[in-house]
């Protein structure tokens, strides 16, 4: 997982380096995702807040790891926002599957003990 430095503002080059993207990709995402809105300095330089960096990380995850289209990612982010869900990275099946399997094994063991009594 990408560690975001503890800063108030990040320049676009810093965010691009952090996300391993080109700056033009971030500028394009700003036009496609209304939730990604860095503030502009008096010299018209983009300044990303921590929540903007987290949103960009989420967008990258949806597009590159989960295979969403831009329209699909936009729709997912909007629906999560309307439901009041935090905008954060989704958990992949690979991350949660071991926990589910462990829970199911414990449940089966419990049921086996109950049926033998």
Image: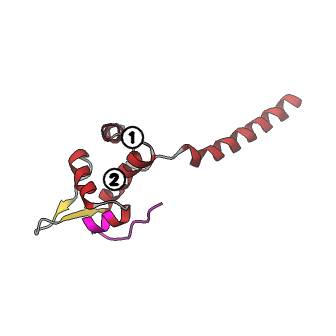
Q: How is the image coloured?
A: secondary structure
**SS category of the residue bearing label 2:** helix
Of the pair 15 and 24, the residue shown nearer to us: 24
Per the model, the C-alpha gap separating discs 1 and 2 is 15 Å
Q: Give the mark count.
A: 2
Tell me if residue 7 is in the magenta stretch: yes
Name the residue carrying label 1. 68
Task: Say if residue 63 shows up in the picture.
Answer: yes
94 vs 90, left or right, is right
Would you place residue 102 above or below residue 46 in this image?
A: above
Q: Earlier in the sequence, mark 1 or mark 2?
A: 2
Of the pair 19 and 37, the residue shown nearer to us: 19
Where, quadrant-wise, is the C terminus in this rendering?
Answer: top right
Q: Position of residue 70 (x, y in %)?
A: 31, 41
The span picked out in magenta is 1-16
Q: Position of residue 43 (x, y in %)?
A: 11, 69
The label nearer to you, 1 versus 2, is 1
Q: Which mark is residue 6?
A: none
Local packing at callout 1 (Cα closer than 10 Å; few below 14, some 14-19, many 20+) is some
Residue at image position (37%, 70%) is 6
Name the residue carrying label 2. 55
Of the pair 46 and 103, the residue shown nearer to us: 46
């Amino acid at each position: 997982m990408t560690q975001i430095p503890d800063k108030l503002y990040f320049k676009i080059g810093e965010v691009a380096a952090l996300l391993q993207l080109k700056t033009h990709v971030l500028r394009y995402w700003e036009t496609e995702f209304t939730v990604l809105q860095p503030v502009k300095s008096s010299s018209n330089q983009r300044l990303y807040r921590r929540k903007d960096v987290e949103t960009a990380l989420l967008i990258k995850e949806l597009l590159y790891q989960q295979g969403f289209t831009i329209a699909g990612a936009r729709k997912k982010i909007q629906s999560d926002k309307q439901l009041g869900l935090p905008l954060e990275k989704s958990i992949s099946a690979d991350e949660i599957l071991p926990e589910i399997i462990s829970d199911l094994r414990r449940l089966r063991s419990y049921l086996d003990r109950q049926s033998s009594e």
